[in-house]
Structures are given as structure tokens and as C-alpha cells.
Amino acid sequence: MNYTQLFEQIKTKRSFLCTGLDSDIEKLPKHLLNHESPIFEFNKAIIDETAKYTVAYKPNLAFYESLGIKGWEDLEKTVNYIRENHPEIFIIADAKRGDIGNTSKLYAKAFFENMNFDAVTVAPYMGEDSVSPFLTYKEKWVILLALTSNKGADDFQYFSEGNTRLFEKVLTKSQEWASKEQMMYVVGATRAEMLEDIRKIAPEHFLLVPGVGAQGGSLQEVAKYGMNENCGLLVNSSRGIIFADSTENFAKVAGEKAQEIQLEMEELLKLHKII
């Protein structure tokens, strides 16, 4: 999926919602545990109820890898289900990879060829040769970690040399590797005020913004500081949608929560004259 197609989907659905499929088997509704593939059954039900409000899905691979082969099978079935039933939706592998060139080349093959994801999250610490193998795939995306929402972000990301903080160096240098057509950045919603500084460096790139909802980030603040003329935002919500209910009505409630966020996003898109 290219930049224009992603923006068109945002306008069509009047939404910039990314639903995180952080499908923790310990939090699944109990009645699903009798299924042969409870994770996939959970994901399928969530997707069926939220797809009309969602422009992207983001499985966090830790919840699948931790289950071994069965988890990988559920992940593959989930991606295939989205592709078959909702081909317009952008799919992100939240894998946070990033290693020397040969290794990254194989990670890219795994996610883009074998699993058919649209994008993968990548850590920038090892530099250009750890990122460039992902960029050889046409209309596939790298989502580079820039400024994260966790407490430990203070350990390194705000380190300053002169007047330049480390996350700003990441943003500036990485734009030499790829354009807005293939590069996005992760920026945590709990640091929404920093989006103003980020937009000075990367005015046109899409930003993947986790941390809204359960983590306390404000959608209004994210839009205020981060939205550009093409929206330029994919705002992720995971627990606040998929684990809003633990009864047999879990999927219906998830759909209602996704719709609530979509309606708020629609108003913000109108306010910024994008739709």
C-alpha cells in the first residue's frame, strides 16, 4: 500500500485508527479457550466488528511468538483473514527488529514476502545498514522507533549533543534513507507535546502513535500537535478496544469502542479540514 492509498482510506473511513491486536491469551474471554485456535478466533471476531472503523491492524508479535509454532500459525491466519476480507486495511508487524544487514534482509523476507505485512517496526540503533534491507520492497514500509511512550525513553532518547536530542538525530538522519513514501515514525501519545518538535523535522511523514486510551494519551492533543494536511497519523489503541469486555459480547463491545474513537477522529479530521 502506498502513501496515497493510505490517505484515501483515512478519508473514506473518516478514521485514522490503528487497532492493536495484542492478543494476550491470559486475557481472552474464557469461553474461547475451548477452541482449537483461541487467539485466531478472538482476532477474527474483533476484526469482524472493528474493520469498518479501522484503517490499520497492528499485531504485537510478542503475544504470538511466546506461544511457539501455534502462535505463528495464529498470526499467519490472522494476516490472511484480513487480506481476504478487508484488503484495504494496512497491516503492521509490531516486531521492533533491527540487526546487521544479512539478518535484517531475512527479517524483511519473513514479514514482507512470507507473511505479507505492509509494514514492520524497526529499531534504529544499529544504523542505516540495519534498516535498508526493509526498504528494498516496493510499497512496503519501515516504521522507525523515534520517541517512545515508555518511562525508559528518558534513558537515551532525550540525550542531547549540543542542541540536538537523540530522537531528533534519528528523525533527521533516517530521512536520508527513505522518503515519506516508505518511512513512518513511532511517537508515543503520552509525549504529545513533542509532536510539535517532531513535525518541524518530519512535516510530511506518517506517525504511528501508541499510548492513547489505557496508557493515558490524549487523542485531542495528538491531533493538535501532530496532524498535517494529509492527516499523517495512525493512532493505535489496543487494550481499550480488544479487552473492553471479557464476556461473550466481547467483540460487539470492541466494535462499539472502535466506533467511539472513529467518531472522535472524524470530528478532528473535519476540524483540520481534511474531510
Image (cartoon, rainbow, N blue to C red):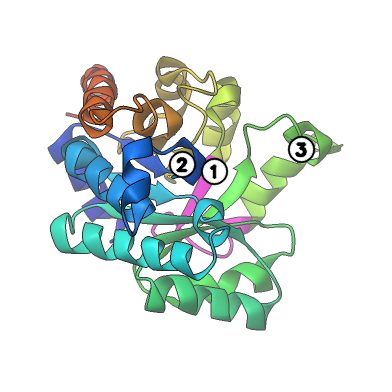
Q: Secondary structure at mark 1?
A: strand
Res. 71 in view: yes
Residue at horizontal 42 percent and vertical 36 percent from the top: 236
Residue 36 relative to residue 208: left or right: left
Q: Quadrant of the N terminus?
A: bottom left
Residue at horizontal 38 percent and vertical 58 percent from the top: 181
Q: State whether residue 125 is above or below residue 73.
A: above
Question: How many residues crowd around disc 1 within 10 Å: few (fewer than 14), some, or many (20 or more)?
Answer: many
Q: Earlier in the sequence, mark 3 or mark 2?
A: 3
Q: Which residues are magenta?
A: 174-186
Q: Can you give x and y, in whole percent of width and height, for residue 104 in the image?
A: 61, 75
Residue wearing tag 2: 208
Q: State whether residue 152 is above or below residue 266.
A: below
Residue 93 relative to residue 65: left or right: left
Residue wearing tag 3: 165
- Give the Cα distance between marks 2 and 1: 5 Å
Question: How many residues crowd around disc 2 within 10 Å: few (fewer than 14), some, or many (20 or more)?
Answer: many
The answer to which image quadrant residue 237 occupies is top left
- Give the Cα distance between marks 3 and 2: 20 Å
Residue wearing tag 1: 186
Residue type indicated by callout 2: Leu
The answer to which image quadrant residue 227 occupies is top left
Q: Secondary structure at mark 2?
A: strand
Camera-side residue: 170 or 93? 93
Residue type indicated by callout 1: Val
Q: Earlier in the sequence, mark 2 or mark 1?
A: 1
Query: Are discs 2 and 1 less than 8 Å apart at CB?
Result: yes
Nearest to the eye among marks 3 and 2: give it. Answer: 2
